[in-house]
Amino acid sequence: MPLNHALAAVLTSVPDCLAATLIDLAEGRWLAVRTLDDVEPEVLDLMVAASAELFENYQLEAAEALYREACKPPLEQRDDCRPREAVVLSRGLTHLFIRNPECPRFVLLCICRAGTSLGLALARSRQAVARLTAA
């Protein structure tokens, strides 16, 4: 399925989704975007920068590494301390950033209305991220 069609499916499956984009952290750019309304490219570029800040934050990785060292979690939880997901709630919008677990350079960003069902939106976004990377 082409990437644009896969993103269109995200808009319909994630509740109250206003925009969906697949971001390539390694390249520092968005690969494709689908929105219900027109969005300026500058706004999308800011979303890429926000994604990089959230997911490539070395201070957070260092803090997680120190926590792992101090708390000694089970072995299966020790190998990767990079953030996997982030939820940003504002007065009018909910931003869901979901890193692909199979290919961590890709992040799906879903922008939803603030009143969305957070649990359902997260579940549907998680389901969509793997399909998007395969597209």
Image (spheres, grey):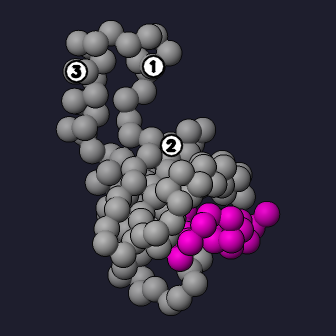
**Which residue is label 2 attached to?**
104
Whether residue 82 appears in magenta in the rendering, the answer is no
**Which residue is label 3 attached to?**
66
Question: Separation of disc 3 and disc 2 at Cα?
Answer: 22 Å
Is residue 106 among the parts visible in the rendering?
no
Task: Check the image and name the residue furthest to the bottom.
Answer: 38
Q: Position of residue 114 (x, y in %)?
A: 42, 70
Q: Report helix, strand or loop for mark 2.
A: loop
> From what the image shows, is residue 71 above or below residue 127?
above
Is residue 42 among the parts visible in the rendering?
yes
**Which residue is label 1 attached to?**
77
Residue placed most toward the observer, 70 or 56: 70
**Is residue 67 rendered to the left or right of residue 96?**
left
The quarter of the picture where residue 57 lies is top left
Whether residue 10 appears in magenta in the rendering, the answer is yes
The quarter of the picture where residue 13 lies is bottom right
Q: Residues within 10 Å of mark 2 (few under 14, many from 20)?
A: some
Residue placed most toward the observer, 47 or 29: 47
On-image quarter of the N terminus: bottom right
Q: Earlier in the sequence, mark 3 or mark 2?
A: 3
Amino acid carrying label 1: it is Gln
On-image quarter of the C terminus: bottom right
User: What residue sits 28% from the left and 34% below the top?
Assistant: 61
Q: Position of residue 20 (x, y in %)?
A: 55, 69
User: What residue sits 50% from the left and 51% below the top?
Assistant: 98
Question: Separation of disc 1 and disc 3 at Cα?
Answer: 13 Å
Amino acid carrying label 3: it is Leu
Q: Which mark is residue 47?
A: none
Q: Position of residue 52 (x, y in %)?
A: 34, 55
Magenta extent: 1-23
> From what the image shows, is residue 70 above or below residue 9?
above
Q: Residues within 10 Å of mark 1 (few under 14, many from 20)?
A: few
